[in-house]
Image (tube, coloured by chain):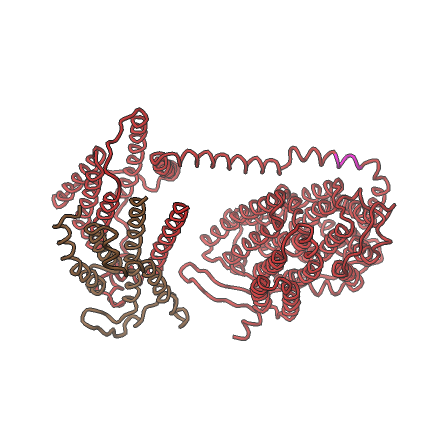
């Protein structure tokens, strides 16, 4: 499947896809889209690279993908923090700050709001999951060919 | 909040101690025993200093009305005093017993450390249980005691009878706990609260309350080893002696009658329920008494005695004599723990467990004979011991009811007298049949202390009154009168006591003539008892589950078929027994919805193509065509978020499948063998069945009148105040954030599982 065309297209659309993913994450509070969709889009980008270049070359090009499981568990930790830090402050679980009715600062479309942080956690978990599972499946495939 | 701290002190001490013993015991096993004893001693002091009438109430999940509500009422104080006090003495005994036990069983000292932390955990669960005021909280601690007891009873896990005994105890008490959960749900639904005091204050006599009361009673009776759920208790004798002593007196078994006491005003709303308690209590007295007479083994005799003795308590609760029940529980706890520890010490010294191999040890172990003798005198209800008053209040209660009850009470007491004598005299009196090796004083001292307590409480009955009156008032919901003193006249309880001693003496002196009878009954009961029925049931269920499992894992088709057919069966049962909608009806199809139909047809066609696909690639593409058509449907009915997610998931799934296929060896031609034909036919059946039920469910849901839109509207209104323009995002991250939290946890756990799976596989392949 790794024809020249596929490789070229895959290389071309990697960055735009990731940008789309970030856009989905950031604009989630303004219109359709959220951390989950963003994570799946980013995951799709990596899956496409996998298809085009195969597991070996993909890992060689992006050795950082080795750490994908940590992204998932880090995301879970971040989610737990946003969920339980309010409890330490005496508020109900998963209270988001600023509270309802208070002013929220914006940097462009990005709202300075802890709900966005929670969405980032969801993004990390989902993206990390897709990439890790892909890596695991690919890794086994490579070993299977050798033996 | 120092006040809250003071209320929670015993629980906190015990919980922290559990942690300390666990931590330090793993490092330095020798430190476990002294640490555990110190913890228990501190917990006793904290319990004694407990001010009654205070409570901690923390609402931790307001949506579901869940409260962390602990209070120090009279009932809690009495039971936690028992749990910590008896626990302390049992731990002292264990400090001498466990090292020897480990040597007998060839185990390392770290197992001993585990023992001490488990006993402390048991104590913690017990204190939490008796202080809990919320039914849900009660359930949690209730199950915690059951789980801890599982590990304690199965402490010698190298022995198969230990393991089986532990499992039996766990099954009986955990399954019966489901009744308690059901009762909580009923009451929560009916009265809108799970708080025990509020329930007791607002419940009115009625069908729901009777059913809830009966469910609570079943759970409690199973825990208190009352007939016909009693069989787990004699089996639990496989546990080390300190565990038995604790289990039978102050923990676990006591938890059952505690719950009956805690919910007594609720039970009292239905008189028939109380009458049932009287019947169960007397049956247990009969079973326990007769079997105790027949048992040749020391601990087994005591186990049946416990069944009978808690039968007394259940009778008293059924008669509404709550204060008397409190007296009985307190006195029995002291006596029974002392007798168990006596049995343990004797077995430790002689290596014998059977009564007919023992005898005449009084000379060699005078202190033990003395302490055990005081306790036995108490169990036989001789005057000047606390035991006299346990029977006095029992007789008074029975006399108050009249009819046949007083006679049954005396008969039960006579049997108790007889087996108590058989136990004590069988060990310490008569001709010498065994030689005792010296045993550490740690094994004797707790027995003597308990025996002396039985004596002192009997000489100064005011102590018993002081300890139990408030407990009685808590159970009754109003102050109760409790006056214990010796009356030197012929009022009914005294006459009944005299009758008991006379009958008991007559029975013991003629033991030779009647002893074969209970033995024959015991033999016969082994074949028809509930023990056997329960064992059959468990075995049958196990075989069924095993057969299903074997079928399920053979092929992929069978696995998927099992799930689909199972789900279809469940849906079918729901529809047959509880049709949640009145009728199915066919709606109209407005012109605006025609494009929808187009995509649905497309989805259907793609599905058909998928079943006909030959190669893997065409299969994947056909399946993704189904998914994309469905996403299009979502976007038509105005659910852009769902549509986006559906498209994305479909894309990633397709790409992932393609990626997997690219790693597989070349697509081999599918063999059309006879086997494959048979499987195909099976797939047809499963597919049609699953589709039919999915169709019925979908149709039923769509036939329902338009769903209540208030929730959705509320979310739409709230979204701006959650700083979100997009309501779906606001729901995911804020309104239902906890759900999302749960979902990402599931994803992370799934990844953890996948990682582990692949890691093991890589390891086995390398080998």
Q: Nearer the viewer, residue B754 or B518?
A: B754
Q: Nearer the viewer, residue B43 or B97?
A: B97
Taking the spot 22% from the left edge, 48% from the top edge, the residue there is B655
Q: Is residue A147 visible?
A: yes
Please state if B728 lies on the left or on the right of A70 as rendered: left
What secondary structure prevails in the magenta region? helix
Q: Total label count?
A: 0
Q: Write the start and end of the magenta stretch as one range.
A: B515-519
Taking the spot 28% from the left edge, 54% from the top edge, the residue there is A130
Q: Where does the image place residue B274, in percent across and percent down from the top left?
A: 62, 48
According to the rendering, which colour does chain B have? Answer: red
Instruction: Farthest residue to the front: give it.
Output: A146
Please state if B118 lies on the left or on the right of B469 as rendered: left
Q: Quadrant of the N terminus of chain A?
A: top left
Image quarter for residue B568? top left
Q: Is residue B517 magenta?
A: yes
Q: Is residue B468 visible?
A: no
Please state if B319 lies on the left or on the right of B733 as rendered: right
């Amino acid at each position: 499947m790794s024809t020249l065309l596929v490789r070229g297209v895959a290389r071309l659309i990697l960055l735009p896809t990731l940008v789309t993913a970030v856009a989905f994450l950031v604009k989630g509070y303004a219109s359709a889209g959220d951390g989950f969709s963003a994570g799946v889009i980013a995951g799709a980008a990596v899956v496409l690279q996998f298809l085009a270049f195969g597991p070996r070359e993909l890992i060689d090009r992006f050795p950082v993908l080795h750490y994908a499981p940590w992204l998932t568990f880090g995301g879970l930790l971040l989610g737990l923090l946003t969920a339980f830090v309010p409890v330490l402050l005496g508020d109900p679980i998963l209270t988001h700050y600023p509270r309802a009715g208070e002013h929220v600062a914006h940097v462009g479309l990005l709202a300075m709001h802890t709900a966005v942080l929670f969405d980032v956690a969801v993004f990390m978990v989902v993206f990390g999951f897709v990439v890790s599972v892909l890596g695991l499946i690919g890794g086994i495939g490579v070993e299977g060919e050798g033996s | 909040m120092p006040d809250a701290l003071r209320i929670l002190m015993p629980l906190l001490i015990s919980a922290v101690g559990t942690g300390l013993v666990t931590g330090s015991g793993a490092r330095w096993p020798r430190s476990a025993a002294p640490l555990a004893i110190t913890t228990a001693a501190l917990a006793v002091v904290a319990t004694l200093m407990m001010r009654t009438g205070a409570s901690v109430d923390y609402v931790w999940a307001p949506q579901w009305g869940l409260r962390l509500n602990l209070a120090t009422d009279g009932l809690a104080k009495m039971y936690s005093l028992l749990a910590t006090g008896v626990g302390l003495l049992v731990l002292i005994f264990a400090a001498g017993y466990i090292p020897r036990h480990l040597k007998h069983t060839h185990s390392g000292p770290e197992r001993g450390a585990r023992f001490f932390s488990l006993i402390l955990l048991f104590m913690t669960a017990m204190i939490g249980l008796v202080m809990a005021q919320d039914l849900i909280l009660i359930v949690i601690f209730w199950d915690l005691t059951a789980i801890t007891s599982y590990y304690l009873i199965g402490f010698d896990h190298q022995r198969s009878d230990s393991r089986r005994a532990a499992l039996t105890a766990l099954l009986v008490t955990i399954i019966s706990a489901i009744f308690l959960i059901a009762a909580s749900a009923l009451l929560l639904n009916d009265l809108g609260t799970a708080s025990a005091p509020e329930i007791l204050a607002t419940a009115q006599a009625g069908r729901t309350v009777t059913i809830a009361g009966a469910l609570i009673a079943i759970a409690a009776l199973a825990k208190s080893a009352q007939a016909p759920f009693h069989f787990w208790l004699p089996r639990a004798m496989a546990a080390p002696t300190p565990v038995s002593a604790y289990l039978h007196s102050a923990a676990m078994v006591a938890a059952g009658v505690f719950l009956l006491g805690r919910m007594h005003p609720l039970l009292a709303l239905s008189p028939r329920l109380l009458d049932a308690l009287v019947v169960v209590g007397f049956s247990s007295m009969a079973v326990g008494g007769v079997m105790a007479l027949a048992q040749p083994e020391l601990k087994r005799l005591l186990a049946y005695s416990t069944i009978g003795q808690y039968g007394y308590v259940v009778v008293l609760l059924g008669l509404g004599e709550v204060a008397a029940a409190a007296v009985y529980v307190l006195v029995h706890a002291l006596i029974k723990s002392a007798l168990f520890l006596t049995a343990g010490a004797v077995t430790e010294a002689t290596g014998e467990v059977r009564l007919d191999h023992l005898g005449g040890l009084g000379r060699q172990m005078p202190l033990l004979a003395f302490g055990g003798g005081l306790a036995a005198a108490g169990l036989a209800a001789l005057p000047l011991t606390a035991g006299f008053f346990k029977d006095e209040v029992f007789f008074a209660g029975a006399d108050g009811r009249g009819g046949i009850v007083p006679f049954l009470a005396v008969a039960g007491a006579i049997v108790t007298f007889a087996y108590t004598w058989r136990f004590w005299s069988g060990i310490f009196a008569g001709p010498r049949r065994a030689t005792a090796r010296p045993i550490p004083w740690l094994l004797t001292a707790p027995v003597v202390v308990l025996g002396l307590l039985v004596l002192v409480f009997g000489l100064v009955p005011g102590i018993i009154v002081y300890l139990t009156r408030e407990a009685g008032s808590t159970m009754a919901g109003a102050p109760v009168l409790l006056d214990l003193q010796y009356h030197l006249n012929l009022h009914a309880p005294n006459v009944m006591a005299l009758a008991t001693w006379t009958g008991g003496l007559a029975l013991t002196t003629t033991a030779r003539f009647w002893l074969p009878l209970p033995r024959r009954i015991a033999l016969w009961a082994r074949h028809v008892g509930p023990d056997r029925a329960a064992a059959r049931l468990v075995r049958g269920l196990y075989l069924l589950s095993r057969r299903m499992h074997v079928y399920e894992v053979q092929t992929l088709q069978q696995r998927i078929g099992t799930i689909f057919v199972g789900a279809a069966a469940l849906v079918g049962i729901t529809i047959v027994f509880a049709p949640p909608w009145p009728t199915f009806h066919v709606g109209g199809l407005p012109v605006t919805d025609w494009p929808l139909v187009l995509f649905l047809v497309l989805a259907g066609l793609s599905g058909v193509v998928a079943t006909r696909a030959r190669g893997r690639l065409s299969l994947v593409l056909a399946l993704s065509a189904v998914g994309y058509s469905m996403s299009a449907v979502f976007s038509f009915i105005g659910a852009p978020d769902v549509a986006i997610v559906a498209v994305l998931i479909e894309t990633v799934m397709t790409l992932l499948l393609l990626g997997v296929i690219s790693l597989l060896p070349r697509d081999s031609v599918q063999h059309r063998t006879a086997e494959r034909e048979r499987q195909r036919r099976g797939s047809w059946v499963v597919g049609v069945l699953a589709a039919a039920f999915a169709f019925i469910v979908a149709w039923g849901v769509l036939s329902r009148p338009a769903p209540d839109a208030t929730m959705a509207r509320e979310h739409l209104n709230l979204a701006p105040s959650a700083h979100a323009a997009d309501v779906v995002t606001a729901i995911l991250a804020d309104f239902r954030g906890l759900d999302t939290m749960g979902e990402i946890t599931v994803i992370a756990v799934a990844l953890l599982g996948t990682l582990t799976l692949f890691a093991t596989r890589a390891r086995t392949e390398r080998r």
